[in-house]
Image (tube, rainbow, N blue to C red):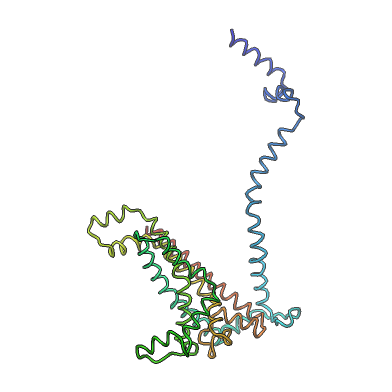
Amino acid sequence: MSSSKQALAHSASSAEAAPGSTPGAARGARGRGAPDGAGSWRSRLYRWDMKASPYAFVAPFFLLFGAFSLVPLLYTAWYSLHNVQLSALDHKTWAGLDNYENLLSSDFFWNALKNTLTIGIISTVPQLLAALALAHLLNYKLRGSTAWRVVMLTPYATSVAAATLVFTLLYSWDGGMVNWILDFFGVDPVNWRESDWGSQFAVSSIVIWRWTGYNALIYLAAMQAIPADLYESAALDGANRWQQFRHVTVPQLRPTILFTVVVSTIGATQLFGEPLLFGGVSGSKGGSEHQYQTLGLYMYDQGWIIGNLGKASAIAWSMFLILLIVAAVNLLLTRRLRKSQ
């Protein structure tokens, strides 16, 4: 009987509803006295909020990126196609690709590119090798491991100016500790600022000191993510620690190593503060003979010392194209590593 009564009540409510509408529409409209369309308005507002909220959350990043990165990048590209002087920014003339052609025919540009490549290799290779070795040591259980990690990160937290000042005193011609140690072992002192390889080695040592601990912590985080079963299997097969490092740790760290190589290469391409402060008065020239002038210093010298903003913009875009090539090589190597795995 109860089921038949429910069926009759359901048919009655369906009959009261308008043709073509849902059976509960009339009852819902009369139920609480809500105005027509209030529920649909709330549902549309909810759907709009769900769709628009993610874009609103990420909008500040894109606004800041556009204002401080994209717009200056495009404006620099426009400047690189003009003859523009720092003293007369409103008077620029169209130059086309003349600034780029002048760079390709300039010995100073190729010298800066060579110095950037040389300093990049001298600073990156020992830096990453030392970082890998230190991370391997810290990966074992040591007393005061947290304190050692803080010590490793201290050089990275030191300002470029302070670090370069200390290294300038160490490499001083008269009274520098480095020359004092060389003299102690019977080696003639080196004029680190004036010699070609000496100045590049001195600048590279500053970069190595500042960034080795940072990369070591990156390697350490990647090592701690390696499954312990791999080391246990290698130990059961008779592999010692060195063999485990070669055949287990290094292969598992290939993506991380590739990442640090690319980041270090980008940093070496943009190297500016260390050679500028190390050179003192002739820092923007990269030494009296431009022996350690990098692309960053060459751009600074052309733009802010000589005042040729058009040529400086062309140098900036040349550096940007070099970084794009590095990114393309990184993408290619990453794909090959994924296929090999």
Provide residue 7's location: percent of width, then percent of height: 62, 13
188 w.r.t. 261: above or below: below
Q: Quadrant of residue 317?
A: bottom right
Nearest the eye: 260 or 5: 260
Provide residue 30's location: percent of width, then percent of height: 74, 23
Tally the marks. 0
Q: Residue furthest top?
A: 1
Residue 307 seen in this snapshot: yes
Nearest the eye: 48 or 125: 125
314 sits left or right of 322 in the view: right
298 sits left or right of 12 in the view: left
Q: Residue at x 59, y 7 (%)?
A: 1
Q: Residue furthest bottom?
A: 188
Q: Quadrant of residue 73?
A: bottom right
Q: Quadrant of residue 50?
A: top right
Q: Quadrant of the C terminus?
A: bottom left
288 w.r.t. 39: above or below: below
Q: Residue furthest left?
A: 238
Provide residue 157's location: percent of width, then percent of height: 52, 68
Nearest the eye: 157 or 224: 157
Q: Residue at x 42, y 87 (%)?
A: 179
Residue 105 seen in this snapshot: no
13 sits left or right of 252 in the view: right
Q: Residue at x 60, y 83 (%)?
A: 101
47 w.r.t. 317: above or below: above
Provide residue 116's location: percent of width, then percent of height: 50, 79
